[in-house]
Image (cartoon, helix red, strand yellow):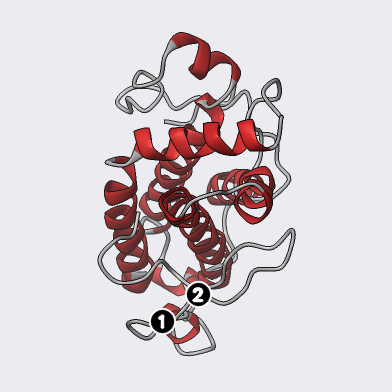
């Protein structure tokens, strides 16, 4: 359980860096929408962001911040798998975990998702942007992080015998740790990047 909490704290730190670049992230998505001649659809899924980055991203700044978002989503998906391996679960913890897995699914429709107070990511968008284009995608990470914190809080109340260690030697044993200065591997269409963002920059449930 300590490894699970540490992994979650690590992603929270990356998210704090990403959150500071929300304006850049939204601008990158706007550039991609223009390049794709796709100005009507909202940003509704992780796979849409992936497709934009692979096919319609025209500069390194936009690519960097889109990769930062996708890397965090990849790590959230991995944590879901590790949480599943820690214990069999209860109806409450399984409900939290199922919601997390649905939200980080590449094709899940995020367009109606909104992070509520105390999160202010939606408030930083204009009303039009929040309602029609970017409200869901900027809400994804904070909503999933809150669900994962709830999962840990409820799991820690379970009897000790209900918990089991990850058979592969712990969460960190399966974490991909990039070598400093290495290049990210090429991504396949429809797949998420497999390594966290390089050195120096990592980037309340309300399902409407």
* Residue placed most toward the observer, 193 or 59: 59
Residue picked out by circle 1: 178
* Residue placed most toward the observer, 119 or 5: 119
For label 1, the SS is loop
- Residue drawn at (45%, 51%) of the image: 151
User: Can you give x and y, in whole percent of width and height, for residue 16 in the image?
Assistant: 27, 47
For label 2, the SS is loop
- Residue drawn at (53%, 27%) of the image: 134
Q: How many marks?
A: 2
Q: In this view, does 188 lie to the left or right of 173?
A: right
User: Can you give x and y, in whole percent of width and height, for residue 84 in the image?
Assistant: 58, 65
Crowding at label 2, few (<14), some or many (≥20) Cα neighbours within 10 Å?
Answer: some
Looking at marks 1 and 2 on the same chain, the residue that comes earlier in the sequence is marked by: 1
Foreground label between 1 and 2: 2
- Residue drawn at (60%, 65%) of the image: 88
Tell me where residue 1 sits by quadrant. Answer: bottom left
Mark 1–mark 2 contact, CB under 8 Å?
Answer: yes
Quadrant placement of the C terminus: top right
- In the picture shown, does residue 183 fall above or below 39? below
As drawn, the label of residue 196 is none
Residue picked out by circle 2: 184
Crowding at label 1, few (<14), some or many (≥20) Cα neighbours within 10 Å?
Answer: some
Q: Distance between the residues labelled 1 and 2?
A: 9 Å
């Amino acid at each position: 359980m300590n490894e699970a909490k540490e992994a979650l704290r690590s992603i929270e730190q990356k998210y704090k860096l990403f959150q500071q670049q929300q304006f850049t992230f939204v601008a990158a998505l706007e550039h991609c929408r223009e390049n794709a001649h796709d100005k009507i659809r909202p940003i509704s899924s992780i796979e849409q962001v992936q497709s934009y980055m692979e096919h319609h991203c025209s500069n390194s700044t936009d690519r960097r911040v889109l990769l930062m978002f996708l890397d965090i989503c990849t790590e959230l998906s991995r944590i879901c798998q590790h949480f599943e391996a820690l214990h069999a679960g209860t109806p409450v913890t399984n409900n939290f975990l199922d919601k997390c897995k649905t939200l980080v699914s590449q094709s899940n429709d995020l367009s109606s998702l909104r992070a509520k107070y105390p999160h202010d990511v939606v408030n930083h968008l204009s009303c039009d942007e929040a309602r029609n284009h970017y409200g869901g995608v900027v809400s994804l990470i904070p909503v999933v992080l809150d669900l994962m914190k709830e999962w840990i809080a409820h799991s820690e109340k379970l009897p000790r015998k209900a918990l089991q260690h990850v058979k592969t030697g712990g969460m960190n044993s399966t974490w991909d740790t990039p070598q400093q200065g290495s290049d990210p591997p090429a991504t396949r269409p429809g797949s998420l990047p497999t390594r966290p963002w390089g050195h120096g920059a990592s980037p309340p449930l309300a399902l409407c």
